[in-house]
Image: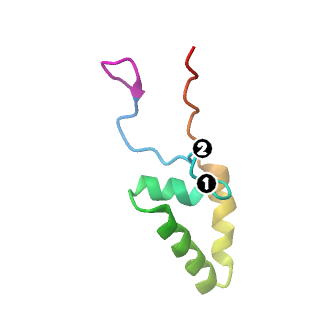
Amino acid sequence: MTQLPHGSSEAPYKQLRRPLDDRLAAGVCSGVGRYFEIDPVLVRVAFALLAVVTLGTALLAYPIMWFLMPEETAPAPWA
């Protein structure tokens, strides 16, 4: 983590995390969309198409990614 001048810290690289705000199930597709800077809806559609093409085998990837991707940290409440 890098300490920024205004006191907050930021990772020196992009992190693949599940967001707390923009999620339908677990936030996996939204997290992937944010990481690659594309609309999460496109990721969801691509995942659905991949699930159809692979006859449902791709559906195994979602719970695995859910387990492996950490959640974003909640912002500190103002005191």
Cα distance between the residues tagged 1 and 2: 7 Å
Q: Looking at the picture, does residue 46 appear above or below residue 8?
A: below
| x and y, in percent, of residue 47 in the image | 56, 72
Disc 1 to disc 2: CB gap under 8 Å: yes
In the image, which disc is placed on residue 71? Answer: none
Residue at screen point 62% across, 57% down = 65
Mark 1: amino acid: Arg
x, y percent for residue 5: 30, 18
Tell me the element at label 2. loop
Q: Magenta segment, which residues?
A: 2-9
Tell me if residue 66 comes above or below residue 49 in the rendering. above
Viewer-side residue, 45 vs 2: 45
> What residue is disc 2 on?
20
Which image quadrant: the N terminus? top left
Quarter of the figure with residue 13: top left
- Tell me the residue at 57%/34% (across/down): 73
Front residue of 61 and 25: 25
Residue 1 showing in the rendered view: no
Q: Residue at x 49, y 57 (%)?
A: 32
The amino acid type found where label 2 is placed reads Leu
What kind of colouring is applied to the model shown? rainbow
Residue beneath disc 1: 23
Instruction: Residue at 62% x, 78% y: name it.
Output: 51
Q: Residue furthest left?
A: 5
